[in-house]
Image: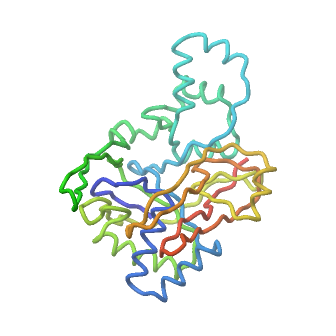
């Protein structure tokens, strides 16, 4: 599903926020349909990825997380400050184009291989994005995803005093896309929900103009992924209790993020740990967990959207 942002967002547009926005919209439209959607996500029948940039016609995915093997030749070259800076830029890459992503899934190139492809001009590295030379949209579009702080003011109704505080917001100057694996019936529900979200907005603070989007298109895509090996996450993932033993014992490369806060009604969301997009596990499959927050009508989507990788 391809979305065109028409305003800034008060939160990262990840699989948790996308699920929450869609679930909220379906709940307002039809409670019975909401139960159908909720159960399909909880059982893993429906899986929703986080959103990623779409620049012109090029899809970008998260940089896969894995440990680069020691490269003696590259280590010697890194004594040159320019080479060292380039290696640092490679390790800080945030997104890779579909072509590069598929090559990484299937061949798992080393740091030296990536460096040589960039030096030869076959791949380009710009604005923390890695892509092949023909995919020039990053430069032409002046691609930018920026996190910044906005000033807010809270009024004390008892003392009539005010307090200034700061919140983070996200700016996108490109289209976004997210992936959905589901049935045709649930896909229709999601499409209907997004039509409502076009009018209302996604995520938090939509009532003051944040989170405005337009549904630009719905397309089927097929990634060239290996038949076996491990898996790379395209969503946030919170393991179910019976998956913890597998996660602890398997080979893995990952980043984690703590999710906590408050619901729109002021209920506290205790901290939960999620594996982030791009994390790798040497497993055939996982499902994850839909976390229901006690005494609220809020759920955090920890169901994994993953693709196979070497």
Colouring convention used in this rendered image of the protein: rainbow
Could you tell me residue 220's position as x and y percent?
52, 65
Outermost residue toward the front? 159
Q: In which quarter of the image is the N terminus?
A: bottom left
Q: Which residue is drawn at 70% across and 16% down?
A: 73
Could you tell me residue 138's position as x and y percent?
39, 39
Q: Is residue 117 left or right of residue 297?
A: right
For residue 172, say whether it is visible: no
Could you tell me residue 124's position as x and y percent?
49, 32
Outermost residue toward the bottom? 32
Outermost residue toward the left? 160
Q: Residue at x 45, y 41 (%)?
A: 135
| Depth order, front residue of 220/31 | 31
Q: Is residue 203 left or right of residue 125?
A: left
| Depth order, front residue of 102/155 | 155
- Residue 212 sits above or below residue 105 on the image: below
Could you tell me residue 102's position as x and y percent?
61, 47
Q: Is residue 225 left or right of residue 51?
A: right
How many numbered circles does the render carry? 0
- Residue 36 sits above or below residue 287 on the image: below
| Depth order, front residue of 153/291 | 153
For residue 129, say whether it is visible: yes
- Residue 4 sits above or below residue 150 on the image: below
Q: Which residue is drawn at 52% across and 35% down?
A: 93
């Amino acid at each position: 599903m391809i979305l065109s942002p028409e305003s800034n967002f008060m939160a990262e547009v990840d699989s948790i926020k996308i699920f929450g926005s869609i679930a909220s919209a379906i709940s307002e439209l039809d409670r019975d349909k909401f139960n159908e959607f909720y159960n399909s996500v909880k059982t893993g029948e429906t899986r929703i990825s986080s959103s990623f940039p779409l620049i012109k016609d090029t899809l970008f995915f998260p940089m896969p997380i894995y440990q680069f093997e020691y490269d003696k030749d590259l280590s010697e070259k890194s004594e040159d400050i320019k080479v060292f800076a380039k290696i640092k830029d490679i390790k800080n890459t945030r997104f890779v184009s579909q072509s590069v992503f598929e090559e990484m899934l299937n061949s798992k190139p080393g740091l030296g291989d990536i460096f040589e492809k960039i030096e030869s001009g076959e791949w380009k590295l710009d604005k923390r994005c890695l892509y092949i030379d023909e995919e020039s949209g990053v430069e032409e579009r002046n691609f930018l995803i920026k996190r910044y702080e906005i000033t807010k003011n809270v009024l004390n109704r008892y003392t009539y005093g005010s307090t200034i505080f700061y919140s983070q917001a996200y700016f996108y100057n490109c289209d976004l896309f997210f992936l959905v694996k589901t049935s045709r019936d649930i896909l229709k529900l999601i499409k209907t929900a997004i039509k409502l979200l076009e009018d209302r907005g996604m995520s938090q603070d939509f009532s003051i103009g944040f989170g405005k989007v337009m549904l630009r298109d719905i397309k089927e895509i097929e990634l060239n992924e290996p038949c076996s090996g491990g898996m790379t996450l395209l969503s946030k993932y919170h393991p179910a209790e019976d998956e913890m033993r597998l996660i602890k014992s398997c080979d893995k490369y990952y980043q984690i993020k703590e999710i906590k806060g408050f619901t729109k009604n002021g209920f506290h969301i205790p901290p939960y740990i999620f594996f982030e997009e791009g994390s790798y596990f040497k497993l055939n499959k996982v499902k994850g967990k839909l976390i229901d927050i006690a005494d609220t009508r809020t759920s955090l989507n920890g169901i994994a959207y993953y693709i196979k990788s070497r």
